[in-house]
Amino acid sequence: MKRRDFLRLGSLAAGSLGLAGCSRTPPPGLPPGQLLGPSQALGHRLRDGTGFPAASETRKVEALVIGGGMAGLSCGWWLKRQGHASFAVLELENEAGGNARSGSNSISAYPWGAHYLPLPGPEAPELRLMLAEFGALKGDPHALRPEYEERYLCFAPQERLHIHGTWQEGLLPQFGIAQAERQQQQRFIEQIAKLKSSLDGQGRPAFATPSARGGSPTAALAGISMADWLQQQGYDAPSLHWWVNYGCRDDYGTDYRQTSAWAGLHYHAGRHGQASNADSDDVLTWPEGNSWLTRRMAQGLGDALQPNAMAWQIEQTAQGCSVLVYLVQENRSVRYLADKLVWAAPVGFLAHVMPSLPQPWQTAMAQLSYAPWLVANLSLRAPPAERVQQPLCWDNVLYGAAGLGYVVANHQSLQLHDQGCVLSYYRPLTEATPAAGRKLLQTAPHAYWARSILAELGRVHPDLPGLTEQLDVWRWGHAMLRPTPSLFSSDALPRLRQPQGRIMLAHSDLSGFSLAEEAHYWGVRAARWLLDHKDEFA
């Protein structure tokens, strides 16, 4: 779809049915479903800063964490395991988890966002420790090649690509590719292998996950796009450009022409996980996606986690932090007084609740831009028919499509897929500007998305429209930070990583891109700061 067509369709959608939260009586030929997502009403109320009642109660804690996504929950998890009791984690929505939230129906649980975790490398010992506590990693979490629970390693077959009318194994295009293109693909893979094993001047991996434990972005890579880097290196193979762009859109929600080359290369070279019972490129996954992790962290926090709590004003004083919090279900505000505060929500939102935002952060936040995303879950009464030898996989991608393909949510089920299945469809709205994408998410009705998704997937599964009994759509207006060249070539990220007085930021935004491993690192780092473990501040 061309950009002008994308915007034109968005305009038509806005003028047609409006925003219906649920399509109980769908148009003929379309399945029923719901339009879901983070509370737009609360978000806009927070943005506008109007209509909040005065505080009716004061609550005191030593540490206050605002935001219950992966970073905020990781911060709370570390505080809890260190025996710290006087803290609270506030979450705006009715359930914690951030972009790792999930849903379920009679067929399976399914993700509304992040749906897998690559094997963490030695640079992520805290994440390995947490996986061991949750039973996903067996034995010594500090082992070079630990053992992982087989049930959580992605079952084979793992991934396939539909290209030139047929399915192939793996996502790097192979069918219908000329020999010269294959040679470029191989050269790129070999170049990535060298980058993956390279070290910086301090002996650290040049690319690591979490990225703060690896080399810093170099000037040569930070300020140019991934597309420009490919051209500089002499890569012009269309199949390679598509594959690299797919990776940027998949992990970052950003076209490779707007993605910093450093971030684009990190996607391929930044992970070093190994296992005694799995290949290094295997992943951990669950029907509900990474919600399997966030829900266990949330359960461990008990009463320290407060959902439906929206911080709407933050003031920092010499004695501590004063935070006005709106309790949504009670329709009242309370005042939290804390010695220290961690902002674990998206960094760009802080300006809406902190009038006296420190100047270093204010300047840095001008560089932040967020990508809009859409996730849909299609409930099928039976798997789509397969007419080729390459069977239905966990990850199924269509070459050249607007979306990223779909994941079979119940792929990990030990039962045969004869009772129906759930397909989780992912689409970053990279065809337009982020603002235009958010506008389309806000205004397009359910029928618009249902037709678009069924038409796209129906090209390879003609029976899909007739099999789909429910099609629900989750809209992420600010799904993840965009790792643009302007962001990585500025000093914004180093500024945001430094505490200002009694407040520290903790979010994957501090890495410049949204990965579970990055969010976990920044959450644990903030917890160590709260505990004043300066010797562990790394």
Image: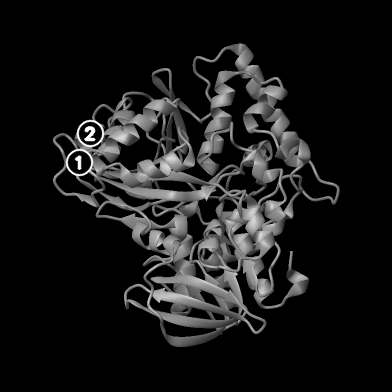
Most extreme residue toward the right is: 201
Q: How many neighbours does mark 2 have within 10 angstroms: few (below 14), some (14-19), or many (20 or more)?
A: many
Q: Amino acid at mark 1?
A: Pro
Separation of marks 1 and 2 at Cα, in angstroms? 8 Å
Q: Position of residue 420 (x, y in %)?
A: 25, 44
Q: Position of residue 409 (x, y in %)?
A: 37, 47
Q: Amino acid at mark 2?
A: Pro
- Mark 1 near mark 2, Cβ–Cβ under 8 Å? yes
Mark number displayed over residue 465: 2
Q: Which residue is mark 1?
A: 31
Q: Quadrant of residue 431?
A: top left
Q: Quadrant of residue 198?
A: top right
Quadrant assignment for the C terminus = bottom right
* Visible residue check, residue 394: no
Q: Position of residue 498 (x, y in %)?
A: 71, 63
Q: How is the image coloured?
A: one colour
Q: Is residue 29 above or below residue 236?
A: below
Q: How many marks?
A: 2
Circle 1: element type: loop
Q: Return the residue nearer the eye: 271 or 85.
A: 85
In the rendered structure, which disc, 1 or 2, sits on the residue that comes first in sequence? 1
